[in-house]
Image (tube, rainbow, N blue to C red):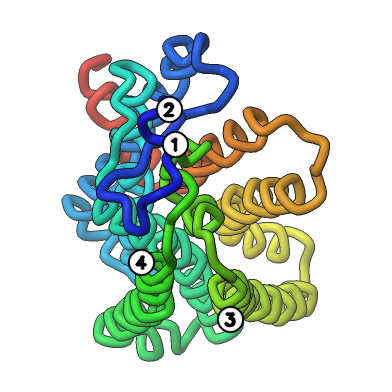
Amino acid sequence: MSDFNTSDFTNPSTFILLGIPGLEAAHIWISIPFCAMYAIAVLGNFTILFIVKREPSLHEPMYYFLCMLAVTDLVMSTTTLPKMLSIFWFNSREISFSACLTQMYFLHCFSAMESGILMAMALDRYVAICHPLRHSTILTNSVVAKIGLAVVLRCGILTLPYPFLARRWPYCRTNIIPHSYCGHIAVVKLACADISISSYYGLFDLFSVSGMDVFFIAMSYTLILRAIFRLPTKDARLKTFRTCISHLCAILALYIPDFFSSVIFRLGHNVPLHFLVLIASVYQLVPPVLHPIIYGVRTKQIRGRLIQPFAHKGT
C-alpha cells in the first residue's frame, strides 16, 4: 500500500477505495447482507416497473411518480454496490480518477432526485385529497412529465459542480480513500488545498435541494391533515389518511437514515471510522430496498397483481 501513499503527485490516475477500513477481514461476511439487499432492491424495483407498465388501472400520476422513484433507486444502488462488492469479494480497490468522479456525480445526483420525486408525490397526495374532483385535470400526463423533467434538470445541474470542483484540486498527499465509494467529501478531503468552496457548495446544495423538498412536503401534509380533519366522520378521515401511509413510509425510509447518518458524521467524533463507513454504505441501500416493499405491501393494486399468479396456481 505504500506504493499508493505518495507525496509527489498532483493528479492521480487512480484512487484506492479501502472498503470498510478496519473490517477488511470481515469483508466476505459483510458482503452477504449487502448482496442480498442489492438483489432485493433490483428485483423489487423492476417488479414495480413491470406491474405498472402491464396494469392499465395503474396508469395514474401516483404510479408514474412511483416508477420514477423505482428507476432512481435502481441507478443509485447500482452506482455504488457493484464496485463495493468487487472490493469485498475480489479486493479490487482501484478506481480511475474519471470513474471516481462519475460515481460521485451519479451518487449525489440520484440521491437528490429521490428527494425531489418524494416532493412530487406529496403534491399528488395534496391534489388528490384537497382537490379530488380536479385531480385528473390538474395532474395530466404532460404535467407529470414536466414535473419529472424539472426534478431531473434541477438535480443534474446542481450536482455538476461536485466533480468539477473535485477535479480542480491538487492531490499531493495520498490517493487512498478510506471509504467504500467516492463520496464528494471523502474525495476532496484528500486534496492539499483549501476546499472551503467545495464544503460551502455542499451545504448550499443540501439546503437548496433537500431543505426545499422537506419544506414543501411539510407544507403539503399540513394542508392534507387540515383537509382530513374537516371530514365529517372518523371512518372517512381514516380511509383518506390511509392513502398517504405508503408515501409517508417512503419519506421516512429516505430521510431517517439520511438524518441519522448526517448526525453521526458531524457529531460522532469518537465513533470508529469503520462504523461511520458501514452506516454510510448501508444507507445507500435502505431506500432502494424499502420503497418497493412499502408500496408492494401497502398498495392494494400492486399487492393484488403480485399475488395473482399464485392465486391462479392454487385454484
Q: Residues within 10 Å of mark 2 (few under 14, many from 20)?
A: few
Q: Which residue does the numbered mark 2 point to in the structure image?
A: 2
Q: Image check: 293 left or right of 218?
A: left
Q: Amino acid at mark 2?
A: Ser
Q: Which residue does the numbered mark 1 point to in the structure image?
A: 5
Q: Residues within 10 Å of mark 3 (few under 14, many from 20)?
A: few
Give whichever of 96, 266 is nearer the camera: 96
Q: Earlier in the sequence, mark 4 or mark 2?
A: 2
Q: Position of residue 89 (x, y in %)?
A: 33, 16
Q: Secondary structure at mark 2?
A: loop
Residue 22 versus residue 282 in the image, above or below: above
Q: Which residue does the numbered mark 4 point to in the structure image?
A: 167
How far is mark 1 from mark 2, CA to CA?
5 Å
Q: Which residue does the numbered mark 3 point to in the structure image?
A: 208
How far is mark 4 from mark 2, CA to CA?
24 Å
Q: Are marks 3 and 2 in contact (CB under 8 Å)?
A: no
How far is mark 3 from mark 2, CA to CA?
41 Å
